[in-house]
Image (cartoon, helix red, strand yellow):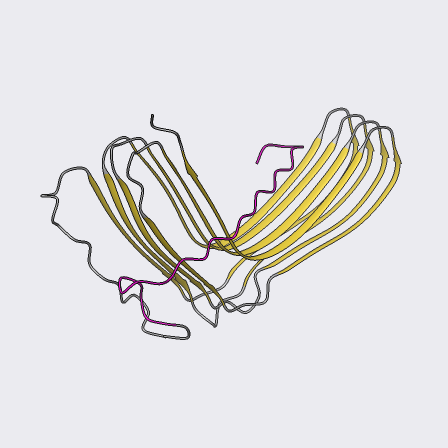
Amino acid sequence: MKSFKILVAVSVLALSATSAFAGGVGDQQYGSWGQPSQNDGGIGSHILNNQINLQNNWSNLNASVDTVGGDVVAQGSAGGNLIDITTMNNTRVFNNQIVGPDSNIGSNIRLDTNNVWGSVGIQNQVLCNGASVSTDPVLTAVQSNQECHAQDPYSSIKTNISNLAGNAVIQGSALGNSFEADSNAPNMPIFSRQLNNSGVVSNVNANIFNAGGSVGLSSSAIGNTSQIIHYNTN
């Protein structure tokens, strides 16, 4: 997301799990995953992604800024497993992402600013599992399994802003599993399974004094989110 723009697109996708998915709820056989079919003779892109995260992922940003002629921007992020796929041909994607129960994923931002002639933007995003697929072929087929067993994907923003000539935009978000797919392929079968077994927390604490522009605050905590776009091919 670009600075000073807030875009929250949330949709719920409920699809039954197929035999290609790795185990069931609570299954601790990390990495077990059905192998892709080779019936197409190997034409196009075959992507098999298997990501397992069993450790902590944590980010801390602490800053104090005084008397600035321009803008002040602070960004923090933490993630378990992420993949971004872009192709221009027939594509088959088999995606398996698992974060284990002993993992802690979080990001803290503490920012104090005073006497800012421009604007202040603060963004903090925490994501357990994220997958994005974008293709422009005749066939796009995706099987995706995402499991977040982390203790608590956690996002925290604490800020004091005073004497600001411009705008102040503050956004915090925490997500368990995120899946996005877009294609103009005539055929686009997608099987998506998302399991969130974690507490998802987003906290924003802000004190803003003497702002010359607008003030926008946003905080969101989401377990599972999916967005699928199938363009018109007529």
Q: Is residue 108 visible?
A: no
Q: Nearer the viewer, residue 132 or 99?
A: 132
Q: Which image quadrant for residue 90?
A: top left
Name the residue furthest right: 210
Residue lying at 47% horizontally and 72% vertically, measured from the top left: 101
Name the residue furthest left: 41
Q: Which image quadrant for residue 199?
A: bottom right
Where residue 189 appears, x then y in whole percent?
31, 46
Q: Is residue 16 one of those drawn in magenta? A: yes
Q: On screen, 117 above or below 142?
A: above
Q: Nearer the viewer, residue 174 or 228?
A: 228
Quadrant in which the N terminus appears: top right
Q: Is residue 60 one of those drawn in magenta? A: no
Q: Which image quadrant for residue 154?
A: bottom right
Q: Nearer the viewer, residue 115 or 217?
A: 217
Question: How many marks do you count on the picture?
Answer: 0
Residue lying at 36% horizontally and 75% vertically, measured from the top left: 28
Q: Is residue 201 visible?
A: yes
Q: Which residues are the magenta region?
A: 1-24
Name the residue furthest front: 234
Quadrant in which the C terminus appears: top left
Where residue 128 appears, x then y in whole percent?
49, 57
- Specify whether 69 is left or right of 44: right
Where residue 156 appears, x then y in whole percent?
68, 55
Magenta segment main secondary structure: loop
Q: Nearer the viewer, residue 201 or 71?
A: 201
Residue lying at 80% horizontally and 27% vertically, measured from the top left: 166
Residue lying at 45% horizontally and 57% vertically, measured from the top left: 14
Where residue 38 appears, x then y in whole percent?
13, 50
